Image (spheres, rainbow, N blue to C red):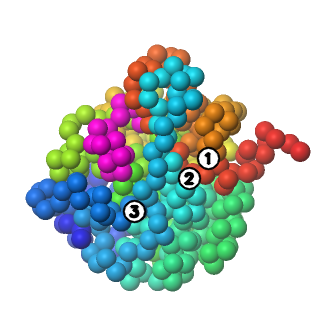
Amino acid sequence: MTTITHLECSVTGERYEAGKLHNLSTGGWPLLVRYDLQKVKENWNRDWLANGPRSMWRYAPVLPAQKPSSIISLGEGWTPLLRLSRMGSKLGMKELWLKDEGINPTGSFKARGLSCCITMCAELGVKKVAIPSAGNAASAMAAYAAAAGMEAHIFMPKDVPQSNFIECKAFGAHVTLIDGLISDCAKIVGDRKEAEGWFDVSTLKEPYRIEGKKTMGYELAEQMRWNLPDVIFYPTGGGVGIIGMWKAFDEMEKIGWIGSKRPKMIAVQVEGCQPVVRAFEQGAERSEFWQNATTCASGLRVPKPLGDFLILKAVRESGGTAIAVSDDELLDAGVRLAADEGQFIAPEGAACVAALEKLLASGFLKPEEQMVIYNTGSGLKYLEAYSTLYPR
Ligand SMILES: *Cc1c(COP(=O)(O)O)cnc(C)c1O
């Protein structure tokens, strides 16, 4: 099982004890989980993975759960890496791949983060969890809380996709719809949690969702036979996946599973909410709150990611970039991909397709480079968004 040693503040490096509940560091920054990677290197062989579970828990030695019996799993992770040959050849590309996270439980990759987070909540005795969410994190939390027998309290913007609202209700969660954005929902959870006895599992305000999402990095390496691609496209809201994958690459290099080559990380956002793109272009270390955030790609409607400095650091260190596309461009790219490949992907994933086309056209990327797009959710969760293309 786990080789966790401690947690540390992502800004100051200050140490925190493992086996305890944590939110942010005393300075108000996200905590990162640390492991004894030397021990992992000596005691674990990547060839043994083939016999492991067909879920993200195949990477249990580098995940935080202390006891196998605490794991709350609904079969998350170990998603397919699919070759996009028809679209790839239309774009004149050598190798284009899609990591399809849409088949996860509750139809998005949020399942990875919440499986790990709710597992740790169960292990550490939490009875009630609360979350502000743009939609899919709430669905995933509600599902895993149901499986763990925990009480779930959810705060979402009132225009959240219908799929998210119905799922949360069906999973038995307490759902409150708010006339505002995820940032307004976060404030309500923050104000009420102490009196209500809720554990706050907001993005990056607890340390274990990153650990679940980092398994996307381990999986990609395993599926590509330990050679990372040249380029990764990632639809960036809170940025948990970018931060997690960047951490996974570092861990795998220390374990001796991969070398020092890193993909260019492309943070994809939308024109209606692009705080990370703006900060990247201005050379800033942190982002500024994006006013009047609006987009049909609801997972990208995060006006001020708490981990902005970690996202920006990963993108810059990787030699990647940050780019925004419009809602029209992403919906169009989404249905073109569907017609070419038989894959109906979420608007967030579709934003990556549109970004890829722009970066090929601008010459920032070359068609010979091996590229992977993360499709973070199923198109079926976004019928309202795609309905605008097909009035009937
Ligand atoms: C939450 C979400 C995102 C953004 O994920 P982060 O890792 O927080 O940046 C992207 N796509 C979908 C479908 C989401 O639900």
Q: Which residue is mark 1?
A: 346
User: Which of 90/57 is in front?
Assistant: 90
Disc number for residue 54: 3
Q: Nearer the viewer, mark 2 or mark 1?
A: 2
Q: Earlier in the sequence, mark 2 or mark 1?
A: 2
> Label 2 is placed on what type of residue?
Gly
Near mark 2 (Cα within 10 A), the count class, few <14, some 14-19 or many ≥20, is: many
Labels 1 & 3 near each other (Cβ < 8 A): no
Q: In screen coordinates, is 357 left or right of 161?
A: left
| Residue drawn 52% across the image and 27% down it | 88
User: Which of 168/198 is in front?
Assistant: 168
State whether residue 325 is above or below residue 133. Answer: above
Disc number for residue 102: 2
State yes or no: Cβ of the residue under disc 3 lies below 8 Å from any atom of ligand 1: no
> Label 3 is placed on what type of residue?
Arg
Query: Where, by quadrant of the figure, is residue 342 drawn?
Result: top right
> Label 1 is placed on what type of residue?
Ala
- Magenta span includes 231: yes
Q: Nearer the viewer, mark 3 or mark 2?
A: 3
Q: Residue 245's x, y, as percent?
A: 35, 47
Q: Is residue 232 something one can see in this rendering?
A: yes
- Quarter that holds the N terminus: bottom left
Q: Earlier in the sequence, mark 3 or mark 2?
A: 3
Near mark 1 (Cα within 10 A), the count class, few <14, some 14-19 or many ≥20, is: many
Q: Residue 209's x, y, as percent?
A: 41, 61
- Quarter that holds the C terminus: top right
User: Which of 222/234 is in front?
Assistant: 222
| Residue drawn 38% across the image and 74% down it | 71
